[in-house]
Image (cartoon, rainbow, N blue to C red):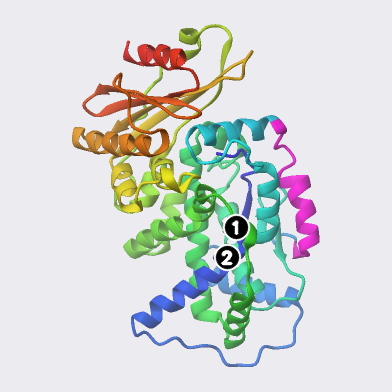
Amino acid sequence: MMNRKNIIVPILIGMVVIVVATFFIIKLAGSTAVVYDDTPAPDVTYSDSMNEIEEQVIQLRGLDMEESIPRRLMSTDELRQVILNDFLEDYSAEDEERDIAVMNLFGLLPADFKLRDFYLDLYAEQIAGYYDSEEKEMFVISDSGFGGMERSTYAHEFVHTLQDEHFDFNGTLGYTDDACQEDSEGCMALQALIEGDAVLTEQLWFQEFGTQEDMQDLQDFATTYKSPVYDSAPEALKESLIFPYLYGAQFVQALYAQSGYEAIDAAFSTTNPVSSEQIMHPARYPNDVPSNPTLPDLETALGQDWVEIENDTLGEWYVYLVLAKAYDPQFRLFDSVALDAAEGWGGDAFSILKKNESGELAAVTALNWDTAADADAALKAFSTYSDLRFGSALPDEYWQGEDYFCAFAQISPESFVWVLAQDLSTLQILLAAVRD
């Protein structure tokens, strides 16, 4: 939900290790022999090694590169400055306040969470390399040379340069800040496709070209690697950070199983994925598309002192996060229950409103479900979640917690509306508006 600079395409340190380790665990579990290249690594500069990796990735991915791009190693100190001056440059105090308010309303962040500071520390800790599609530059983060960690990172990030050259992130794909602000679900799906392709190709590169020295470097790194910022993060932020890599890899591997990179190229060029639902359930791509409802004029219903500060779509992924990954563990449903409830998602729309004078907040989320049975199961899950977060429902069929009032309005057998407000009269006005 944060409006960060989406045209920066990073790989996270933890993901580099997970990508390679997961691959070898799968291969060994399947009794498939893993053969390393035991030839001693030649004494070459990191630039020569990058050139070699580029040729190998081009061979694997089947996409040529017309023009080379600047690439270099960047120190961790330099990275922190880049995060401040580039990644977070346009992330204002107002943006941060809005994002915290939205995520707090949905129970995903405490109201006093320092989101900008968190992102600064997290990116500084986690980013192993990145490709900047605006400046057409690529960087690998390293304070100690170009070993197995950096080589794997470079293989991953070089895939992004090929993707951008052939499929055009900022133009044809529409993977830009403005487009992501307008359609976060579509943006999330594109990011998962982009990262999933890079994860798969990184795995194939390591299988084909990784050396024993590369694997030893990664094993040594993994035994000493610590991530205190990530480990202490609210669960929803942690889960969303890895979504494009893990679920994206699952989605792309399903395409690859159909017809190799031809199916992946088609997802980039002819039929882009459009929702987190399609990424989570590859069998639903490309035909199962969201049917998002339209909300009434809530500003008019509440009066002229109210303004809408955010409108967007939760999507299946964030519905799951709301139900299972609240910042307070006491609010959470079991993962299996939350996943089952979210799976019937068919589309949604939410609006966050703020009263100028007092700062009072309210949220209205209209949710469509695939079937009446799906809507019934989801409403039961949301009701249980409300019991955990706000206490038992009152006789008038609303919940009253310490910070918010909560209620649901059944609109049709396949849809209901979830309303949150800090004042009971506001809740009642919004319920009347969505029922008209």
Q: Position of residue 402 (x, y in %)?
A: 49, 29
Q: Earlier in the sequence, mark 1 or mark 2?
A: 2
Disc count in the image? 2
Q: What amino acid is found at the position of numbered circle 1 in the picture?
A: Tyr
Q: What amino acid is found at the position of numbered circle 2 in the picture?
A: Gly
- x 48%, y 52%: residue: 192
Q: Based on the displayed image, in which of its 4 quarters is residue 411 positioned?
A: top left
Q: Based on the displayed image, in which of its 4 quarters is residue 429 positioned?
A: top left
Q: Reply yes or no: does residue 194 show up in magenta.
A: no
Report which residue position mark 2 lands on. Answer: 14
Q: Reply yes or no: does residue 85 show up in magenta.
A: yes
Report which residue position mark 1 lands on. Answer: 230
Q: Are marks 1 and 2 in contact (CB under 8 Å)?
A: yes
Rendered position, 411 above or below 135: above
Residue placed most toward the observer, 323 or 350: 323
Residue placed most toward the observer, 161 or 372: 372
Does residue 211 appear left or right of residue 289 in this picture? Answer: right
Segment tinted magenta in the rendering: 71-93
Q: Report how far apart the C-alphas of labels 1 and 2 lie in the structure.
A: 10 Å
Q: Position of residue 226 (x, y in %)?
A: 63, 68
- x 29%, y 21%: residue: 395
Does residue 40 appear left or right of residue 308 in this picture? Answer: right
Residue placed most toward the observer, 414 or 162: 414
Q: Position of residue 433 (x, y in %)?
A: 38, 12
Q: Which numbered disc covers residue 126?
A: none
Rendered position, 93 above or below 31: above
